[in-house]
């Protein structure tokens, strides 16, 4: 499966420290290998999204919950849209990305 990223995701990923980047990359590789079949706790459906195929990649890194929103496009392409640290809650940003 092909995994693509957006500029928003890339900017966030590039700013990560080495440990967080390695943990997120391991989860991206798992997503690439398992695709839509990647189970919980590694991926889950985003509740409250108006997009039925919106999911989140769930990564633990040094006790911090990192999340990356993604969706599957035609021809089995996964697209990582945006990401962040769940501890740094920002409901307005989350609401903007899931609606």
Image (cartoon, rainbow, N blue to C red):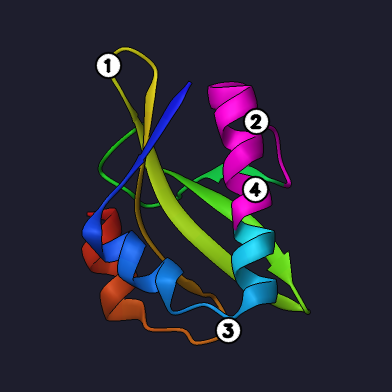
User: Which of labels 4 and 3 is toward the front?
Assistant: 4
Q: Earlier in the sequence, mark 4 or mark 1?
A: 4
| Residue designated by label 1 | 74
Could you tell me which secondary element the residue under label 3 belongs to? loop
Residue 38 has which mark? 2
Residues at marks 4 and 3, CA–CA distance in whole angstroms: 19 Å
Q: Earlier in the sequence, mark 2 or mark 1?
A: 2
Where's residue 65, x and y in %? 65, 71
Could you tell me which secondary element the residue under label 4 belongs to? helix
User: Which of labels 1 and 3 is toward the front?
Assistant: 1
Instruction: Classify residue 36 by image quadrant.
Output: top right
Instruction: Classify residue 21 by image quadrant.
Output: bottom right
Residue at the image point whose x is 52% and y is 77% from the top: 16
User: How many C-alpha atoms fall within 10 Å of the one at disc 2: few (<14), some, or many (≥20)?
Assistant: some
Q: Earlier in the sequence, mark 1 or mark 3?
A: 1
Q: Quick check: 15 left or right of 52?
A: right
User: How many C-alpha atoms fall within 10 Å of the one at disc 4: few (<14), some, or many (≥20)?
Assistant: some
> Which of the pair 18/45 is nearer the observer?
18
Magenta part of the chain? 25-41
Residue 27 has which mark? 4
Q: Earlier in the sequence, mark 2 or mark 3?
A: 2
Could you tell me which secondary element the residue under label 1 belongs to? loop
Q: Earlier in the sequence, mark 2 or mark 4?
A: 4
Residue at the image point whose x is 34% and y is 62% from the top: 10
Residues at marks 2 and 1, CA–CA distance in whole angstroms: 17 Å
Instruction: Classify residue 87 by image quadrant.
Output: bottom right
The prevailing secondary structure element of the residues shown in magenta is: helix
| Residue 65 can be seen, yes or no | no
């Amino acid at each position: 499966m092909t995994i693509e990223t957006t500029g928003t995701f890339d900017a966030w990923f590039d700013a990560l420290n080495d440990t967080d980047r390695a943990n997120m990359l391991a989860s991206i590789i798992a997503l690439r290998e398992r695709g839509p079949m990647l189970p919980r706790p590694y991926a889950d459906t985003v509740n409250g999204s108006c997009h039925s195929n919106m999911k989140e990649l769930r990564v633990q890194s040094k006790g911090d919950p990192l999340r990356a929103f993604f969706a599957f496009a035609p021809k089995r392409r996964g697209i990582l849209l945006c990401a962040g640290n769940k501890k740094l809650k920002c409901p307005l940003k989350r609401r903007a990305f899931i609606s």
